[in-house]
Amino acid sequence: MSSPPTLARRVLIGIAVTQILVLFLGPIASVSLSFWSNDISLEELSADRVETLVADSLIRDESGDVRIEPNVELKQELERIPDLLFAAFDVHSTAPLAGSSPVLVKELQDALRLRPMHLHFFLSEDKVKRAHGMLGPHWTKQGPYYLAIYNQRPRWSDIVDTFNNAISALLPYLFGALLFSMCVSWYAMRHCLQPLRALSEQASQVDLDRLSQQFSEKDVPGEIAPFVQAINEALARVDGSAQRMRRYFANAAHELRTPLAIMRARLENAPESALVVNLLNDSSKLQTIVEQALSAARLEEQKEAFDADVDLQATVQQVVRSFFPLAVKSGRSIELETCEGMRLVKGNMAALTAVVSNLIDNALKMEPEGGTVIVRMHGRADVEVEDHGKGVAPEDRERIFEPFWRENDSTPGAGLGLAIAKNVMEKLGGRIWIEDTPGGGATFKLSFPRVVGADATVVRPLQQSLAARH
């Protein structure tokens, strides 16, 4: 699908079309105004053509004298205009050539003494005192001669040729003006649209975590400013609604904690039976959903800072130790692999604990009974949680981080843990992704780029890190 034309392209096309219209209509208007103001007469339109006919009719006879012998075209013009007069004079002696109209010779002989470069005239015997005649020097095949014509009348072709000549004369200037105006317009559009590109850059950063971000109105054109203000107002309304929804979500989750805890305590004190066991399992699932929902709401509210220095290795070890009882109870084990030189990272201990806890909890659910979940730390700030279950299909590796997503109804969990983990990693500026475990299963990988300076490296003996396996 082709992209829609840009505003700059539309404006430039409009300017180009306008300039082209001016290119053709300008000469027409100029010639028309000349007629209207009497700066030019209809007789002048045919002057060049008739003078050319007279010049082409100059011949040199056997004695070497030049005279006027009307050619075919001049004869046709005389048939069309019987009262057409023409004459030719030597530029040096001003002597008339044979074949010249006697009336013109008589009237113009004295005027030629002035050596005119261009002369408009009318005959004294003409009733209409209008300058129908023209006189001027011309270069012909026989040499330079003064040519005079009188009573010439234009054809339609003369009018067309006049406009064509006017356009041809102005074309280089108009083309240059068109090119210059297009370049200036292009530069102006680029400069004027710069604030819009800046707004587009800001808009690309807007998401549910940045709804309070307002678009800058600096350097925004007055025509665009009301639109930007309306967008800012809309974002403010959406941000207010989102905050109310988050508060409602957090309050609902918080209010559910106490009734669920009371219900679970009563079930634990009830006589053991199959129904009580099933209800305990269901209440555990409900508690997990509520706790994860509450964690998600707290993270969305960003009540805690994410720029504290956190000992990543100590945090992971503490989480792994807390899962040992659950792993043993479920018939599985956890193995921790650490390395020397792990660094402090910028973040929040509670948030990092939630991320690693969710990944280990997810891995224990996927790990076959009797298997081992491996938590591995390597590099400067990288963590891996490896299980040996059925793995994650490539097409599901993005959707698995969506809230409440589960592969099917039989999949354990509420579908919130991985969503929370991804949300936290994004806030930390880190990454979380999935790769295949060699031999089968899924490996969730965490990378923390916000490492504290080199002087904050945490060095521990390798034996102490490995002791967390037992």
Image (cartoon, grey):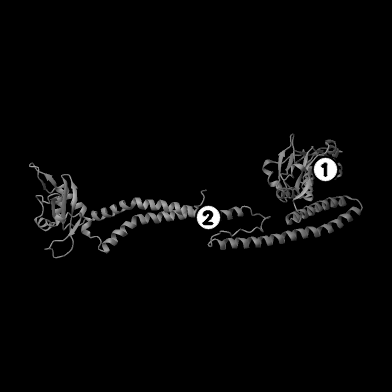
The kind of residue on which mark 2 rests is Leu
Q: Quadrant of residue 360 in the image?
A: top right
The residue to which callout 1 is attached is 317
Residue at the spot x=36%, y=56% of the render? Answer: 22
Considering every residue shown, the one lying at the far front of the view is 114
At mark 1, the secondary structure is: helix
Q: Nearer the viewer, mark 1 or mark 2?
A: 2
Binning the other alpha carbons within 10 Å of mark 1 as few (below 14), some (14 to 19) or many (20 upward) gives some
Binning the other alpha carbons within 10 Å of mark 2 as few (below 14), some (14 to 19) or many (20 upward) gives some
The residue to which callout 2 is attached is 193
Residue 82's x, y, as percent? 12, 56
Distance from label 1 to label 2 (Cα)? 54 Å
Residue 377 appears anywhere in the view: yes
Q: Is residue 460 left or right of residue 143?
A: right
* In the rendered image, the vertical position of residue 312 relative to residue 46, given as above or below: above
Comes first in the chain, label 1 or label 2: 2
Residue 313's x, y, as percent? 80, 42
Q: Return the residue nearer the eye: 336 or 117.
A: 117
At mark 2, the secondary structure is: loop
The kind of residue on which mark 1 rests is Gln
Residue 410 appears anywhere in the view: no
Residue 360 bears which disc, if any? none
Residue at the spot x=79%, y=50% of the render? Answer: 350
